[in-house]
Image (cartoon, coloured by chain):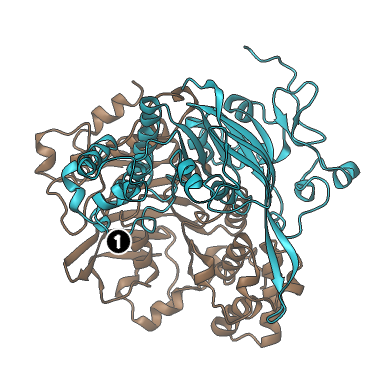
Chain colours: A cyan, B brown
């Protein structure tokens, strides 16, 4: 997928802390869940940026911040050059046309009392000026056809469709306003294996056809690799590594990325006895009380004193091919073939 | 005998006082049929399942939602809700004895003690109002008449065994105070407490993060290696199967459509469904191109197509597939495929 130079989405130092309060009458803040804690990246036109990480790493909060469904504690999100974090009312509505969300669970994200046609056409009710009323039904049918559903089924209800078909309905709704960016939050993880490939292919086709840019959030590393041009790895609210897919999967620098990749079961039994595995001990720490310095140091086999004292910034280190946030990144001696 | 390491299956007493026949497989499921009565009619969830398992072996049962993989396991375990469920035909032979023919009292003596099960969702499988120490200890108190103090001591040993840090300190904590991975360890501790001969693991790592999943699978295989128990691993994840299983049984529409040694199935699948699943895995060399997707949808169990239930989605389909359901063809000493055209599928595997 050819990504052209100009960024359609710019995220800078994005922070979201959820206050933790105590007391019934006089509520006072006793701490904060640091869900997203200083995230920056660009997304270019036609590009797919995959975001991977485990539960609690902040990837879904990030999606909500990008959609302006949450107000960040600080930092900026610019969609097509326009700041959305402080946008209100008509201005916010205008920006949101350009960025749409496809959610994980096609069973709870569609209103069971609305017909599929009404669900897909609802964006036109909210953004009345996009399409005159008389042309909406036709356009909804076109959208259903684009995502591979029968346009004559617009009068049916969500329960009459399978999980994969419901996800297509959600995608059709996401396309209604012709956005440039679609944020996909675990779009295939609720689907059966034989259906996942169908939806992944659909997303790929739509990207080529409409020049879409995707933020593709998922925990399935092989699906992310398949669809992404670049990948960001998140751990406890931070991006710990960011690079092209070949860099992240072929030359992972951050110990967490290496552990994550080696933990994925390989769907090939040949040579399984010899496979090298990094098994991390324990669970990720709580985002309410992250470790000092590097957040991964409590589970890291490379950790030294400096890791507890200094937080490693996300940057390209000498000898490295891409950005990582580790004092002791894994470096690969062989130069890149291109 | 404490802990879970000692004791091979043959040292355990057989119920009913009879000697354990050495040549019987640990478990043999034969022609199992299960139906659910619903308002819309009978849902045929399991339609003739056969498999066998030896001690120390891991059989992976692979299938998607509605394939009947969990219902088969629940029938083996004897925990189906009847009604609405009904086993309409078949036998479940555990060391030669048909479990389906046992009285509920005798069945209950097998369940938990000789056949144990762990589930995907540990939070709902554990009782929220009792401490984990109490729940693990319950296995010893109820099944072996252990004293409270003794049960508690053995619960701590088990929690150590499944590597829950600070076991003695956490004995009196409640399930919600543990992370998902730790809860799964608690459930494993309860399951292996009485040194079962057979462990059924129903999607044991599906709800877990990938790094925690690796921890749990490592723990399960280690316990199995040390105890020699047989394991049925129910999953939809082709990666988990490839990592852990000796044999694989692929289920579709309530039947086993292919069974094989795991290396054989991955090297050259003999059923179009298995082949379709393996082909749909994203691989590096297919990046930027379309994935091979299996077209269409899984069958509706209320209204199964006549003939082969995979036929409407099958690229190998011929005229007779929609008419005649293929039997499970024996295509080798350890292999079977329920496809009329298994030869073509096998041949095409390398092309």
User: Which residue was labeled with disc 1?
Assistant: A112
Whether residue A102 can be seen here:
yes
Work out which quarter of the rendered image holds the C terminus of chain B and state it. Answer: top left
Q: Is residue A251 left or right of residue B341?
A: right
User: In the rendered image, is residue B259 in sight?
Assistant: no
Residue A231, image quadrant: top right
| Occupied quadrant, residue B105 | bottom left
* Residue B257 relative to residue B167: left or right: left
Work out whether residue B118 or residue A285 is closer to the camera in this orientation and state it. A285
Towards the viewer: B143 or B39? B39
Residue B325 image offset from top left, x and y in percent: 15, 46
Toward which corner of the image does residue B100 lie, by quadrant?
bottom left
Question: How many numbered circles does the render carry?
Answer: 1
Quadrant in which the N terminus of chain B is drawn: bottom right
Badge 1 sits on which subunit? Answer: A
> Left or right: where does residue B155 sit relative to residue B301?
right
Residue A305 in the image: x percent, y percent? 90, 44
Residue B204 horizontal/vertical position (percent): 51, 57
Residue at 47 percent of width and 43 percent of height: A96
Q: Nearer the viewer, residue A14 or A220?
A: A14
Q: Is residue B305 above or below residue B164?
A: above
Q: Residue at x 9, y 43 (%)?
A: B323
Which residue is at a point 44% across and 24% down the rendered structure image? B286
| Direction from residue A237 to residue A175 in the image, left or right | left
Above-or-below relation of A75 to B132? above
Q: Is residue A11 above or below residue B96?
A: above
Q: Position of residue A303 (x, y in %)?
A: 83, 43
């Amino acid at each position: 997928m050819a990504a052209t130079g100009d960024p359609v989405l710019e995220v800078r130092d994005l922070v979201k802390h959820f206050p933790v309060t105590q007391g019934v009458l006089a509520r006072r803040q006793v701490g904060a869940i640091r869900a997203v804690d200083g995230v920056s990246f660009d997304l270019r036109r036609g590009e797919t940026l995959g975001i991977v990480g485990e539960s609690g790493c902040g990837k879904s909060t990030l999606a909500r911040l990008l959609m302006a469904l949450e107000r960040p504690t600080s930092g900026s999100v610019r969609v097509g050059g326009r700041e959305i974090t402080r946008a209100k009312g008509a201005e916010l509505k205008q920006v949101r046309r350009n960025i749409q969300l496809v959610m994980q669970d096609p069973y709870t994200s569609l209103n069971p009392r609305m017909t599929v046609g009404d669900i897909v056409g609802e964006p036109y009710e909210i953004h009345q000026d996009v399409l005159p009323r008389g042309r909406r039904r036709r356009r909804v049918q076109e959208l259903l056809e684009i995502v591979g559903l029968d346009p004559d089924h617009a009068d049916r209800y969500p329960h009459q469709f399978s999980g994969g078909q419901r996800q297509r309905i959600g995608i059709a709704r996401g396309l209604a306003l012709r956005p440039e960016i679609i944020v996909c939050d675990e779009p295939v993880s609720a689907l059966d294996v034989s259906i996942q490939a169908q939806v992944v292919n659909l997303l790929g086709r739509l990207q080529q056809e409409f020049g879409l840019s995707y933020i593709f959030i998922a925990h399935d590393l092989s699906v992310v690799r398949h669809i992404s041009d670049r990948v960001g790895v998140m751990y406890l609210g931070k991006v710990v590594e960011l690079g092209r897919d070949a860099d992240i999967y072929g030359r992972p620098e951050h110990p967490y990325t290496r552990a994550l990749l080696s933990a994925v079961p390989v769907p090939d039994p040949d040579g399984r006895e010899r496979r090298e595995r990094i098994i991390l001990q324990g669970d990720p720490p709580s985002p309410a009380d992250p470790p000092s310095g590097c957040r991964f140091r409590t589970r890291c086999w490379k950790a030294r004193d400096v890791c507890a004292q200094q937080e490693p910034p996300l940057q390209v280190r000498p000898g490295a091919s891409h950005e990582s946030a580790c004092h002791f990144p894994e470096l690969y001696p062989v130069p890149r073939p291109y | 005998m404490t802990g879970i390491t000692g004791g091979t299956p043959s040292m355990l007493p057989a119920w009913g006082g009879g000697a354990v026949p050495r040549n019987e497989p640990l478990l043999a499921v034969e022609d199992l049929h299960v139906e659910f009565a619903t308002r819309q009619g009978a849902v045929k969830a399991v339609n003739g399942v056969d498999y066998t398992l030896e001690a120390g072996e891991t059989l992976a049962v692979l299938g998607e939602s509605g394939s009947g993989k969990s219902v088969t396991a629940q029938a083996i375990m004897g925990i189906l809700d009847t009604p609405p469920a009904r086993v309409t035909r078949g036998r479940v032979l555990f060391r030669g004895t048909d479990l389906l023919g046992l009285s509920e009292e005798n069945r209950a003596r097998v369940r938990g003690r000789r056949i144990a099960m762990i589930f995907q969702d540990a939070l709902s499988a554990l009782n929220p109002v009792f401490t984990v120490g109490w729940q693990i200890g319950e296995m010893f108190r109820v099944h072996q008449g252990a004293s409270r103090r003794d049960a508690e001591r053995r619960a701590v040993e088990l929690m150590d065994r499944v590597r829950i840090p600070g076991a003695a300190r956490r004995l009196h904590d409640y399930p919600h105070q543990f992370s998902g991975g730790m809860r799964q360890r608690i459930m494993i501790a309860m399951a292996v407490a009485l040194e079962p001969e057979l462990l059924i693991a129903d999607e044991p790592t599906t709800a877990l993060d990938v790094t925690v999943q690796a921890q749990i699978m490592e723990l399960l295989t280690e316990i199995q290696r040390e105890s020699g128990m047989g394991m049925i691993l129910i999953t939809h994840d082709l990666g988990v199967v490839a990592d852990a299983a000796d044999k694989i049984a692929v289920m579709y529409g309530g039947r086993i459509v292919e069974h094989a040694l795991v290396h054989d199935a991955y090297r050259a699948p003999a059923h179009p469904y298995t082949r379709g699943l393996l082909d749909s895995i994203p691989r590096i060399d297919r990046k930027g191109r379309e994935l091979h997707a299996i077209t269409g949808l899984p069958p509706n169990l209320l209204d199964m197509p006549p003939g082969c239930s995979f036929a409407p989605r099958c690229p190998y389909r011929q005229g007779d597939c929609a008419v005649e359901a293929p039997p499970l063809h024996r295509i080798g000493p350890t292999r079977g495929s329920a496809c009329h055209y298994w030869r073509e599928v096998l041949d095409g595997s390398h092309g």
